[in-house]
């Protein structure tokens, strides 16, 4: 692959924090207070199971359950995520490190190119799936903690936007 990081990765659009489910409501209150967020900047989703999920390359059906509270209005999205069930990078992180910053998410121009680019650098996909947004949006989490100190997540919003623009 001759593409550079800048050819594939558009920019950071999200930071995710993992917490135990029993602490998620307190974290949400803390974020609102510290960052001065209003209720309309907070989205508390029901537990979702992402379709077509994989965990270390193997299908994970129905997909791991995750409860997410998302916060906007900070120039990027901040997520507080609580794993509920199934095999996932969220559960792995919580078991190994406890609560804390789980990932930094990059919007990418090509899901396949991002996977290949990171794999060439020894950073492989841990778990991936279709976003609940639909429309071909995919996400992936990578085993980058040892190398970078945080997990990378990619989401192909730019790729979908480019495809839609062409049609």
Image: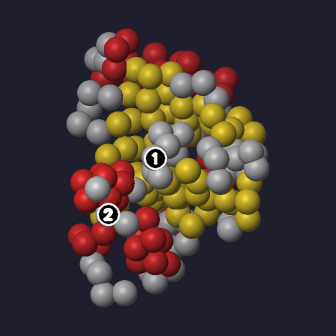
Horizontal arrangement in the rendering, residue 102 relative to residue 106 (left or right):
right
At x 54%, y 18%, the residue is 26
Q: Secondary structure at mark 2?
A: loop
Q: Secondary structure at mark 1?
A: loop
Horizontal arrangement in the rendering, residue 79 relative to residue 50 (left or right):
left
Residue 58 location in percent, x, y?
A: 73, 65
Say if 163 sits above or below 34 in the image: below
Residue neighbourhood size for the residue with mark 2, other residues' Cα within 10 Å, grouped as few (<14), some (14–19), many (≥20): many
Of residues 4 and 27, the one nearer the viewer is 4
Of residues 71 and 149, the one nearer the viewer is 71
Of residues 21 and 57, the one nearer the viewer is 57
Of residues 96 and 15, the one nearer the viewer is 15
Horizontal arrangement in the rendering, residue 43 relative to residue 159 (left or right):
right
Say if 69 sits above or below 138 in the image: above
Say if 36 sits above or below 149 in the image: above
At x 56%, y 18%, the residue is 25
Q: Quadrant of residue 167?
A: bottom left
Looking at the rendered image, the disc whose residue lies closer to the viewer, 1 or 2, is 1
Q: Quadrant of residue 163?
A: bottom left
Residue of label 1: 135
Viewer can see residue 86: yes
Question: The N terminus lies in which quarter of the figure?
Answer: bottom left
Name the mark on residue 109. Answer: 2
At x 45%, y 46%, the residue is 135
């Amino acid at each position: 692959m001759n593409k550079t990081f800048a050819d594939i990765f558009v920019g950071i659009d999200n930071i995710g924090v993992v917490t135990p489910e029993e602490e998620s409501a307190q974290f949400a209150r803390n974020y609102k207070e510290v960052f001065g967020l209003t209720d309309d900047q907070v989205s508390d989703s029901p537990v979702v199971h992402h379709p077509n999920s994989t965990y270390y390359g193997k299908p994970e059906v129905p997909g791991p359950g995750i409860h997410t509270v998302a916060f906007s209005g900070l120039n990027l999205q901040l997520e507080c995520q609580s794993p509920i069930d199934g095999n996932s990078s969220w559960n792995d992180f919580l078991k190994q490190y406890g609560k804390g910053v789980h990932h930094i998410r990059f919007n990418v121009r090509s899901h396949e190119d991002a996977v290949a680019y990171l794999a060439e650098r020894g950073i492989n996909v841990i778990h991936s799936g279709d976003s609940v947004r639909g429309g071909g949006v995919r996400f992936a989490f990578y085993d980058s903690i040892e190398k970078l100190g945080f997990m990378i997540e990619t989401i192909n919003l730019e790729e979908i936007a480019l495809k839609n623009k062409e049609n």
